[in-house]
Amino acid sequence: MEFEIKDGLENYDELFPQVESILNADEPVITNAANFTALLKQSFKKISWAGFYFFDGEKLVLGPFQGKVACTIINIGNGVCGTSAEKKETIIVENVHNFPGHIACDGGSNSEIVVPIVSNGKLIGVLDLDSYDFSAFNDNDKFYLEKFCELFVNKLDLENFSIS
Ligand code: SME
């Protein structure tokens, strides 16, 4: 790795080159996804859970994550993840208890952001971040997380990737 990976950066600009350095097109998508979630989790104290759900052509299936045990299958249109996948839009939820259909994997979670991973218009999955804080995520998180997910899509060969 070109960069020393630092804990608790809490700074997206500094994090950007670190994301670039850990994503490696010569390694499997799952391997890249695993380190990507670890980097996010170790960089922000506010993140209680960071993980991927990948689209298997029908539903979302749990991918690499950092945090507590989570639900394994989410149907498109269900919960925050399924809604983001369906709309192909980032969703910021300031208070998950007010989000109709929110799926509570960890009862301690209070806010969430879900960013869709889309390659050439095709849904690949979603990146899901949870927090025990209320209103932990805002438009700044959205801006950078979308950039990171774009990098994920552009650097890796997702066209030939399948979770199943
Ligand atoms: N809360 C998500 C489910 C996944 S967990 O947060 C890890 C949702 O409502 O889709």
Image (cartoon, grey):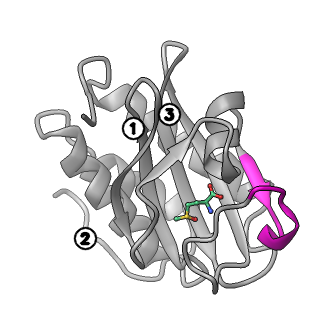
Residue at 39%, 74% (x, y): give it. 69
Indicate which disc residue 54 carries: none
Q: Quadrant of residue 115?
A: top right
Q: Is residue 21 above or below residue 107?
A: above
Q: Is residue 32 left or right of residue 45?
A: left
Magenta-colored stretch includes residue 93: yes
The secondary element bearing badge 1 is classed as helix
What secondary structure is found at the residue carrying circle 3?
helix
Span shown in magenta = 91-101
Left or right of residue 11: residue 153: left
Q: Nearer the viewer, mark 2 or mark 3?
A: 3
Q: Above or below — where is 52 with respect to 132?
A: above
Q: Do the CB atoms of the residues marked 2 and 3 lie less than 8 Å apart?
A: no
The image position of residue 36, as x and y in percent, is 35, 57
Task: Tell whether label 3 touches label 1 (CB within 8 Å).
Answer: yes
User: Where 12 sits versus 86, above or below?
Assistant: below
Instruction: Residue at the far left: name it.
Output: 26
Q: Mark 1 to mark 2: distance in Å?
A: 20 Å
How far apart are the two marked residues, 1 and 3, measured between alpha carbons? 5 Å
In x, y percent, where is residue 141?
Answer: 68, 58
As measured in the structure, the alpha-carbon distance from the residue carrying label 2 to the one carrying label 3 is 22 Å
Residue to which mark 1 is pinned: 152
Among the two numbered marks 1 and 2 on one chain, the one whose residue lies closer to the N terminus: 2
Q: Is residue 145 left or right of residue 150?
A: right
